[in-house]
Image: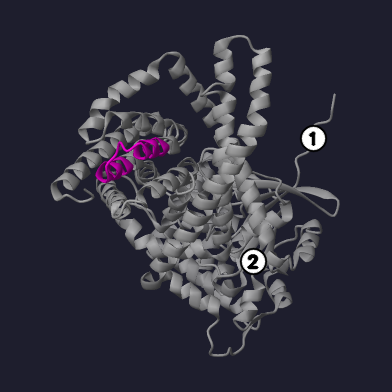
Amino acid sequence: MAEQQQPLPKVVLVGNPNVGKSVLFNVLTGAYTTVSNYPGTSVEVSRGQCEIAGTDYEILDTPGMYSIMPITEEERVARQILLQETPHAVLHVIDARNIERMLPMTLQLIEAGLPIILVVNILDEAKRLGMEIDLQKLQKNLGVPVIGTVMKRRQGLPELQQAISEYASVPHKTFTYGSDLERDVTRLATVIKGDYRFSKRATSLLLMQKDEDVEQLIVTGENTENLELLQTLVRDVIFERRADLHLQISMERKKICKQMLDGVVQQTELSEKEPFAELLSRWTVNPWSGVPILLLVVYFGLYKFVGGFGAGTLVDLLEGNIFEEYINPPVINFVQQHVSAEWLFELLVGEYGLWTLGIRYAVALVLPIVGTFFLMFSLLEDTGYFPRLALLVDRVFKKIGLSGRAVIPMVLGFGCDTMATMVTRTLETVRERIIATILLALAIPCSAQLGVILGLLSGVPGALAVWLLAMILVFLLVGLLAAKVMPGEHPIFYMELPPMRLPQLRNVLVKTLSRMQSYFMEILPLFLFASFILWSLKMLNVLEGLIGALSPVVRAIGLPVEATSAFVFGFFRRDFGAAGLYDLQTNGLLTPAQLTVAAVTLTLFVPCIAQFLMMKKERGLRVSVSIFVFVSLLAFSCGWVLNKILLTTGLLA
């Protein structure tokens, strides 16, 4: 019998968001990573492998956390990993510039009895701000290894790898709190008899703060008699203190950290001239300058690079030249020679075949668009722009039931709404995820559709302005309505602002390739399934029936009956619908007003089938069908209203 393979020792990365954990993860693992939801949650956890000093390790990149006392689902997942994974080492990555604010979490981790290595990252930015940090003295004060790094340049990587390979668990220092608090912690710790992953002191502190997960943990970990004694003692401690224990414990830790850093951090005087990066950082969060910067990013990053280069040049090259001229002919020829059944031929390489539509669409159309989008996304991400954009739009987004965090899926939607729907799983509350999914399905056009519609409307004076105004109004009004009527928790938003910096090309490429791989593996089955549905509808002669059924609705919003097919095919592929409008305009069948009504209605119309399938996967069938029906009715209602306004006012006549 073959020997059972031993699990690899685990190294877990923890820390606040935007401190360089992901950069460290990519440096350690390269592109050999897997991204998956943590069991029972919608939070993604990245896993990879690396070899250090001849030993293979599994590396886990946890979601950002500010404390081991969780508030968000991401923090809960990160702590769950610490409780369940039994790591060889836990790398707590902190931003050197904010060392005093981030060190309290280091104390929590040490106090919990975890095998901590403190990684003081972004040292170059700290030095630029005049900070000098004595890492040796800090290591002596904390009693755990402390490594200074500039991970984007791989500075400190050899020392960190050595610390990981040579790590040996030693008794941790204990940090004494003020007399009253220390007395209560000691009272609880002496009563706890169960064996837990966190130390008795850490467990006691979490019980005092009414941590529900830890309260549940002791129910199974203590015998009945001891459990009752412990629960009574916890209630007595909380009652006796009658104070905000969260605040008191936090203040005690901050006091200890201040003592720890005495003589560790030295601040030197800086010249009065403000660095350009700091100036740019302030510009991006100020509405008066931040909005114009956002418009420039959208124009050059999305419209020109993703829409023009990705959806135009690259798609033409891959689909028009490589696939149509060099790949499809031999594949179709091969199938013709070896497949005699007509239905199977149509299924494989017919008009809606698995190869000719499903694979070709995924590889030749979506992949170049998503690839250029991910490249631009990674560039902007590594500059530190997105947290500032989230801060800029947070006030507006709160009005529509979202937080600044939702800016990421909204921006991703302009690349591919299917991908953006998948990313809504990172939002904090179920309410926020549903609202974001509705808005993505309704008012955020993907780059393929956006490129065609912008090309159509740019030749009609005023049409583009009407279309843009309609999209903004619908987005805001539906968001406001959803925020009013939808029950659930309101999102809490706080985010660390990383320094503005020039992105490192290698990091950008690794992120882009990793995201493309993960996305492609998720999306390819959906495209194949969509092709199969289209093939089935064609074989059963259902497509013609759908077009006939939708024709009266299309005529009601003032469009010719020939426009019906654009809406039907728009469900199966968004750019197909937009391309149908292009054919109608070229043939002179649409007036400027009709073109504008058609563009607005089609943009608001139901999501493509791939996005619908992703919605079903993320939100469930009932919610997805409800969104589908709501979006369909609203799209044609808006088209009808816009048609009446244009006819009455004579605009675009």
On residue 509, the disc is none
**587 in the magenta segment:** yes
Residue tagged 1: 5
Q: Along the horizontal axis of the image, is 550 left or right of 322?
A: left
The residue positioned 68% from the left and 25% from the top of the image is: 330
* Boundaries of the magenta span: 578-600
Badge 1 marks a residue whose secondary structure is loop
Q: Where residue 136 sits: x, y (%)?
A: 74, 75
Q: Where residue 622 sits: x, y (%)?
A: 36, 30
Question: Magenta segment, principal secondary structure?
Answer: helix
Q: Amino acid at mark 1?
A: Gln
- Depth check: give the residue in front, 123 or 518: 518
Query: Quadrant where the N terminus lies?
Result: top right
Task: Please identify the quarter of the rendering in which residue 564 is found.
Answer: top left
**133 in the magenta segment:** no
Q: Along the horizontal axis of the image, is 458 left or right of 183?
A: left
On residue 174, the disc is 2
CB contact under 8 Å: marks 2 and 1? no
The residue positioned 66% from the left and 58% from the top of the image is: 507
- Depth check: give the residue in front, 176 or 150: 150
Give the Cα distance between marks 2 and 1.
37 Å
How packed mark 2 is, by other alpha carbons closer than 10 Å (few <14, some 14-19, many 20 or more), is some
The residue positioned 30% from the left and 21% from the top of the image is: 548
Is residue 609 visible to the viewer in this orientation of the structure? yes
> With respect to residue 247, does 270 lie above or below?
below
Badge 2 marks a residue whose secondary structure is loop
Is residue 16 visible to the viewer in this orientation of the structure? no
